[in-house]
């Protein structure tokens, strides 16, 4: 059973989905834009039923109770702080961290900065940020793939473009790779006053982030070969930025939306990673 809970922190109250018995292995899931905690429903059910206590928050801006107005309040250090605050509120000294897309971007920073808190890290789709920056600078293909971020950072213009014509552009982001009812849920949530601006503020605060260091905790990186956002150059280079045990898995013919497009394959890899690193 998946529970709907609230977690109160100094930044505000996060809405979360949770599964599994308290006292189980602690696993925290971080979602992608423009989704929410619901993207992890399959993983919540399976991991929660397999002895883990799994928590997936609607992150800063997605939870109405943590939705500051300034773009600067979405800088990476704040997002990392939210992860720590949620873990502290749960009483978790150490936990397994799993992130998809923007959630993985935050996860890379948490794993690099706080290895004493992170038992294992699993990144889905998003490569190590340093590998991505190098690829953008040196690989024309990756530079083109990342060009959409410029449009997402435009104040007010991005909101109007994404929500015009019954949010047609927002719906197209998902490439028709996930169930329609799930898309409708995400679109409905981000169509509420202030919600889309808050989600886009993650992109608008990007320049405020410093470099992310190497990761020493056991790390799994899962990348779909049909990912339209992250190409093979950054994906293949990510291992250079992991000094601890590292596993890279490519899912053939799978797009960016791995947790919902290939839930069984991803969850199998996650379970293998967790079982391989129990310490």
Image (tube, grey):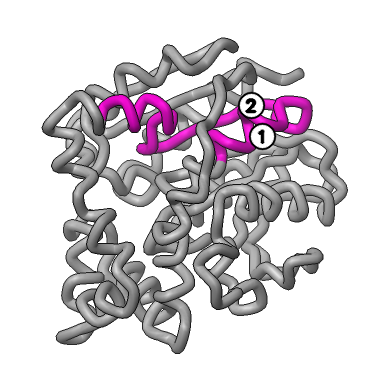
Q: Nearer the viewer, residue 230 or 21?
A: 230
Q: Is residue 276 left or right of residue 22?
A: left
Can residue 4 be seen here? The reply is yes
On screen, residue 166 versus residue 202, left or right, reads: left
Q: Is disc 1 surrounded by few (<14), some (14 to 19) or many (20+) residues within 10 Å?
A: many
Q: Which residue is mark 2?
A: 120
Q: Is 251 colored magenta in this rendering? A: no
Whole-Å distance between the Cαs marked 2 and 1? 5 Å
Residue identifier under label 1: 96
Q: Secondary structure at mark 2?
A: strand
Say which quadrant the N terminus sits in.
bottom right
Label 2–label 1 contact, CB within 8 A: yes
Q: Position of residue 96 (x, y in %)?
A: 66, 34
Query: Residue at point 40% right, 75% down?
Result: 196
Q: Quick one: SS at disc 1?
A: strand
Query: Who's the residue at 64% across and 64% down the image?
Result: 16
Residue at left 18%, top 71%?
A: 169
Q: Which residues are magenta?
A: 107-135
Residue at 34% from the left image edge and 17% from the top image edge: 237
The quadrant of the image that shows the C terminus is: top right
30 vs 122: above or below: below
Q: Earlier in the sequence, mark 2 or mark 1?
A: 1
Specify the quadrant of the image occupied by residue 12: bottom right
Image quarter for residue 15? bottom right
């Amino acid at each position: 059973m998946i529970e709907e809970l609230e977690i109160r922190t100094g930044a505000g109250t996060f809405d979360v989905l949770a599964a599994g018995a308290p006292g189980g292995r602690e696993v925290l899931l971080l979602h992608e834009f423009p989704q929410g905690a619901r993207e992890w429903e399959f993983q919540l059910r399976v991991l929660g039923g397999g002895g883990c206590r799994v928590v997936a928050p609607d992150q800063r801006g997605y939870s109405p109770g943590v939705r500051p107005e300034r773009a600067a309040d979405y800088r990476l250090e704040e997002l990392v702080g939210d992860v720590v605050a949620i873990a502290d509120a749960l009483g978790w000294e150490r936990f397994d961290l799993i992130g998809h897309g923007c959630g993985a971007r935050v996860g890379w920073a948490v794993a690099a900065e706080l290895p004493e808190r992170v038992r294992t890290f699993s990144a889905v789709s998003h490569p190590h940020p340093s590998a991505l920056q190098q690829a953008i600078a040196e690989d024309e293909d990756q530079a083109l793939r990342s060009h959409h971020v410029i449009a997402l950072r435009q104040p007010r213009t991005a909101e109007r473009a994404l929500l015009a014509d019954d949010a047609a552009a927002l719906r197209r982001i998902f490439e028709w790779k996930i169930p329609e009812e799930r898309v409708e849920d995400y679109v409905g949530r981000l169509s509420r006053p202030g919600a889309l601006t808050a989600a886009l503020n993650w992109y608008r605060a990007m320049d405020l982030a410093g470099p992310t260091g190497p990761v020493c905790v056991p790390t799994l990186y899962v990348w779909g070969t049909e990912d339209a956002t992250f190409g093979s150059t950054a994906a293949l280079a990510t291992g250079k930025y992991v000094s601890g045990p590292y596993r890279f898995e490519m899912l053939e013919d799978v797009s960016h939306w791995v947790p919902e497009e290939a839930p069984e394959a991803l969850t199998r890899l996650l379970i293998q990673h967790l079982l391989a690193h129990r310490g």
